[in-house]
Every structure is written in structure tokens, then in C-alpha cells.
Image (cartoon, rainbow, N blue to C red):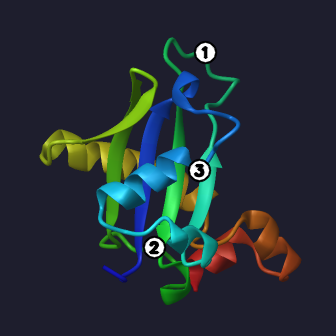
Amino acid sequence: MDQPKRIILRLQEVDLDEADLYEPVRLYLEKNGRSVEELDAGRHFVHIQPPNPDIPQVDPKLHVVIDLEASKHSGKLGPDFPHEVYRIRRVDGKLVMFGFRDGAWYQNFVRKLRSIIDDVYPWGKTKRDLRASGGTGAQALES
């Protein structure tokens, strides 16, 4: 349970409550038998990737990326690094989490998401953090 893993929560933009951006993260933690107090303890690092406004989309999605147990890994996320992707929807005013069925489509979908997210969001920090420490995203991913 305390192993590092990247979780990607995919939800419609309209389903995110801007007054409570951590609602989907708490849902994930609760559904997986984890305490929401882990957020206050700083064990996990959360990134929120909004939809790209430059790409016209009928149903814009955003991604909430959770680096679980962020301090237990550093450097590049290799091809075998554990990732899980879930869909989040608001049903009757409440967020609900759905898993994807494992198979060829899901594996391809995860690869496509990772090709973007793993580069844009270095493990456990922001690119701004990397620049402030004198590194770059590329350097961090190579270490």
C-alpha cells in the first residue's frame, strides 16, 4: 500500500468543483482504503491538468494526477512504473469513481496518457520546482 504509484483521475471539466479541487483525490483515497489525512501529511503530490483550450473539444476532460508516496521515488518513470487510470463522474451531485476494464484498449490508452503526463509532470514536483532547484524536466526524467 505504501509503494509509489501514479494515479490519473479523468473527469469532465463540469464535474470538478472549483471550490474543492481535492474532492476527486479524497474520493480515490477513500475508495482504496486510505485515509484522507495522508494529504495533510504530505505523502502524495497532486497535479491538476486542465483541458487544453487551444484544442476544440466537445466534451473537455481534465486529469488529476496523484503521485502516491512521492518521497519513495525520484527520477524517471520507466515503462513498468505502476500507473492506474480511473473515470470520475458526478452523479446526483456526488462524485463516483469507475475503473477501466484491463485489456488492449486500456493499455494503449494508458500509454497515450503517459506520453503526455509523464513528461509534463515530473514525479513529485512541478517543473517550476525543478527550475528553482537548478534542474530541468529533462534532467529530472533522466536521473
Examine the rendered structure and indicate whether residue 79 appears above or below residue 140: above
Q: At label 1, which amino acid type do we have?
A: Pro
Residue furthest top as drawn = 58
For badge 2, the amino acid type reads: Leu
Q: Regarding mark 1 in the picture, which secondary structure is present there?
A: loop
Identity, as a three-letter code, of the amino acid under mark 3: Tyr
Nearer to us of marks 2 and 3 is: 3
Residue with the mark numbered 2: 77
Dot 2: few (<14), some (14–19), or many (≥20) neighbours within 10 Å? Answer: many
Distance between the Cα atoms at labels 2 and 1? 30 Å
Is residue 115 something that shows in the picture?
no
Give me the residue at 67% from left, 78% from top: 139
The residue that label 3 is drawn on is 22
Q: Position of residue 67 (x, y in %)?
A: 50, 68
Q: Nearer the viewer, mark 1 or mark 3?
A: 3
Whether pointer 1 and pointer 3 mark residues with C-beta atoms closer than 8 Å, the reply is: no
At mark 2, the secondary structure is loop
32 sits left or right of 57 in the view: left
Which of the labelled discs sits on residue 56, or is there none?
A: 1
